[in-house]
Image: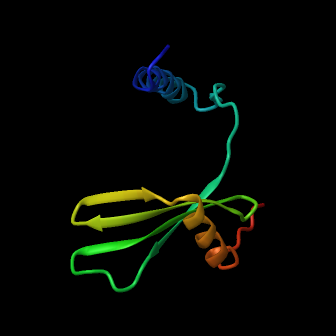
């Protein structure tokens, strides 16, 4: 079974080859895309952060305007820590923010 690191390496070779094809032929259409999904990431920085430390919430919304995921983040200097919410915490975030943002896709 192929490891994820090996799979990433293989995909990067494919993407590099596609880039070379695009550079030689601007009309080249990358054929290895199975589908495209849109996710919008909102970055909510919370008030009351400590000096030099910022924390907040990443909220991910699909093109239907539904929150599909959220994560808690802490930024300290150049380091970022991301913590996944539990299902219960995610439900709270969805209830709190579901009517705050809207998405209009044409």
In the rendered view, tell whether residue 94 sits above or below residue 4.
below
Residue pushed farthest front?
88
State the residue at coordinates (39%, 57%).
Answer: 82
State the residue at coordinates (62%, 76%).
Answer: 97
Which of the two residues, 56 or 18, is positioned nearer the viewer here? 56
Q: Is residue 14 left or right of residue 93?
A: left
Image location (x, y in percent) of residue 69: 59, 58
Image location (x, y in percent) of residue 23: 50, 29
In the rendered view, tell whether residue 89 sits above or below residue 68.
below
Q: Is residue 52 left or right of residue 102?
A: left
Residue pushed farthest top?
1
State the residue at coordinates (47%, 16%).
Answer: 2
Question: In the picture, residue 102 is in which quadrant?
Answer: bottom right
Colour setting: rainbow
In the rendered view, tell whether residue 87 sits above or below residue 36.
below
Which of the two residues, 88 or 25, is positioned nearer the viewer here? 88
Q: How many marks?
A: 0
Q: Is residue 30 left or right of residue 56?
A: right
Quadrant of the image containing the C terminus:
bottom right
Which of the two residues, 45 or 96, is positioned nearer the viewer here? 96
In the rendered view, tell whether residue 29 sits above or below residue 62.
above
Image location (x, y in percent) of residue 15: 50, 27
Question: In the picture, residue 66 is in which quadrant?
Answer: bottom right
Image location (x, y in percent) of residue 42: 54, 67
């Amino acid at each position: 079974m192929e490891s994820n690191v090996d799979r990433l390496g293989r995909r990067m070779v494919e993407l590099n080859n596609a880039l070379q094809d695009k550079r030689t032929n601007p009309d080249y259409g990358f054929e290895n895309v199975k589908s495209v999904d849109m996710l919008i990431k909102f970055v909510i920085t919370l008030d009351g952060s400590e000096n030099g430390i910022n924390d907040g919430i990443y909220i991910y919304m699909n093109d239907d305007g539904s929150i599909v995921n959220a994560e808690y983040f802490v930024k300290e200097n150049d380091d970022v820590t991301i913590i996944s919410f539990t299902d219960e915490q995610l439900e709270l975030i969805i209830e709190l923010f579901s009517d705050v943002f809207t998405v209009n896709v044409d």
